[in-house]
């Protein structure tokens, strides 16, 4: 069976010789995350690559290997691989066509075009885009550059593992997001040779997790409809190549919920001052979860990507704010008489919360004649203030419930 070795990764590192395409990204310690996790946490800042993710490593290694033997490149991607292939192809002087799902974030579509690729939007998910791209490549006799099922791609991604081993010589655990498995496959192959005592942990979004079942069955298992805010790891499948590397070199695979990913995104923004996408935040979500014990260790979560558009960022942050009760929606039952909204609003204001929106609901089955619901959307400082608001409204004799 084809595999990837540390020699492949070292050879790939020699090819990544243009810092305008691939750079060695920094590692930065985080006192806040160290305190929250009980570990000595250093963040691998791979979202600071020129394309905003690690994907350029593999794409550039692949195109440097094939050299002049290719006249056109085709790839499929939810976004990050698209940008990596587009930049690598442009640097190699080769035209590229990238197929992306129709729901791909606009920021990633625009960036892929900016790096010189022709973008086609096809299908509702990564697998549909992949099928279309394979057809294009076959019709035009072009080189199809797979996002993860390619030893050259995996070896290129593995160069990140060599960097981490050099940058954090006392490393105990590295935490790597898993989509198709190319990144963790390459990183784990490299670390198993240069730092065999390091624990390699993979993390997947719970509603897009393919690896746990694949490991149990011994074959790649697909998820037909991966559903997660971490679109960069919503591939719905791993390959035989990456599954074998995971089986051989990865110590543990955990899953995290979208709630945990959203919370980690907000923590990284607030405490580490780093803006990352859901896939990039998944590794931090893992070290803050109950699924992974890193207490007392030196741990490096890989921030694999930072390509998040404003619409998805708003969704993620509102999700996290709701979980923290910083965004609160209350439904208050009232006698539909003048002054009720003013009274409740004063009680909310008295606790220092801000009303973002309010509406009347009258056509509701469980209301009596002359009654209504007032639905308030509030901003609070967190659970303490949210609880005080609920108490203040109830103290006025109102029936109130939280509805988000």
Image: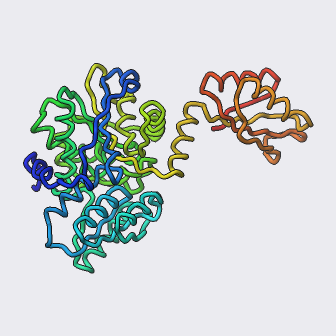
Q: Residue at x 39, y 47 (%)?
A: 306
Q: Residue at x 38, y 40 (%)?
A: 282
How many numbered marks, from 0 up?
A: 0
Does residue 328 appear in the picture of this structure?
yes
Q: Residue at x 33, y 69 (%)?
A: 131
- On the image, which quarter does residue 133 sit in? bottom left
Side of 235 where 342 appears, left or right = right
- Quadrant where the image shows the C terminus: top right
- Viewer-proximal residue among 210 and 60: 60
Task: Please name the colour scheme applied to the rendered image.
Answer: rainbow
Percent position (x, y) of residue 132?
34, 71
- Viewer-proximal residue among 16 and 298: 16
**Which residue is at the far bottom?**
139
- On the image, which quarter does residue 211 sit in? top left
Percent position (x, y) of residue 100?
39, 64
Side of 372 where 79 appears, left or right = left
- In the image, residue 343 above or below residue 63: above
- On the image, which quarter does residue 261 sit in? top left
Percent position (x, y) of residue 12?
14, 53
Does residue 253 appear in the picture of this structure?
no
Q: Residue at x 76, y 41 (%)?
A: 358
Side of 388 where 135 appears, left or right = left
- Quadrant where the image shows the N terminus: bottom left
Percent position (x, y) of residue 98?
34, 67
**Which residue is at the far left?**
7
């Amino acid at each position: 069976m084809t595999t990837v070795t540390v020699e492949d990764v070292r050879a790939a590192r020699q090819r990544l010789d243009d810092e305008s395409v691939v750079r060695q990204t920094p590692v930065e310690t985080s006192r806040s995350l160290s305190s929250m996790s009980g570990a000595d946490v250093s963040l691998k800042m791979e979202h600071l690559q020129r394309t905003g993710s690690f994907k350029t490593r593999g794409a550039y290694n692949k195109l440097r290997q094939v050299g002049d033997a290719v006249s056109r490149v085709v790839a499929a991607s939810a976004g990050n691989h698209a940008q990596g292939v587009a930049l690598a192809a442009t640097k190699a002087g080769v035209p590229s066509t990238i197929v992306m799902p129709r729901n791909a974030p606009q920021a990633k579509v625009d960036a892929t075009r900016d790096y010189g690729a022709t973008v086609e939007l096809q299908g509702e998910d990564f697998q549909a885009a992949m099928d279309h791209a394979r057809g294009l490549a076959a019709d035009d006799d072009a080189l199809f550059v797979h996002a993860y099922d390619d030893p050259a791609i995996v070896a290129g991604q593995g160069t990140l593992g060599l960097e981490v081993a050099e940058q954090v010589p006392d490393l105990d655990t590295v935490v790597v997001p898993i989509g198709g498995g190319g990144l963790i496959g390459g990183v784990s192959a490299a670390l198993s040779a240069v730092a065999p005592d390091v624990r390699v942990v993979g993390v997947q979004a719970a509603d897009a997790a393919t690896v746990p079942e694949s490991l149990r069955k011994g074959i790649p298992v697909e998820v037909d409809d991966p559903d997660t805010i971490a679109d960069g790891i919503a591939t719905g499948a791993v390959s035989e190549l990456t599954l074998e590397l995971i089986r051989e070199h990865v110590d543990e695979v955990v899953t995290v919920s979208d709630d945990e990913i959203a919370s980690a995104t907000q923590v990284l923004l607030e405490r580490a001052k780093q803006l990352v996408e859901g896939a990039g935040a998944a590794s931090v979500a893992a070290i803050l979860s109950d699924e992974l014990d890193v207490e007392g260790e030196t741990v490096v979560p890989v921030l694999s990507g930072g390509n998040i558009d404003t619409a998805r960022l708003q969704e993620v942050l509102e999700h996290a704010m709701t979980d923290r009760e910083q965004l609160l929606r209350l439904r208050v039952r009232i006698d539909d008489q003048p002054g009720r909204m003013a009274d409740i609003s004063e009680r909310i204001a008295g606790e220092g919360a801000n009303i973002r929106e309010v509406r009347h609901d009258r056509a509701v089955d469980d209301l009596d004649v002359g009654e209504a619901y007032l639905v308030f959307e509030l901003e609070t400082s967190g659970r303490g203030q949210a609880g005080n608001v609920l108490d203040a409204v109830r103290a006025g004799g109102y029936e109130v419930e939280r509805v988000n």
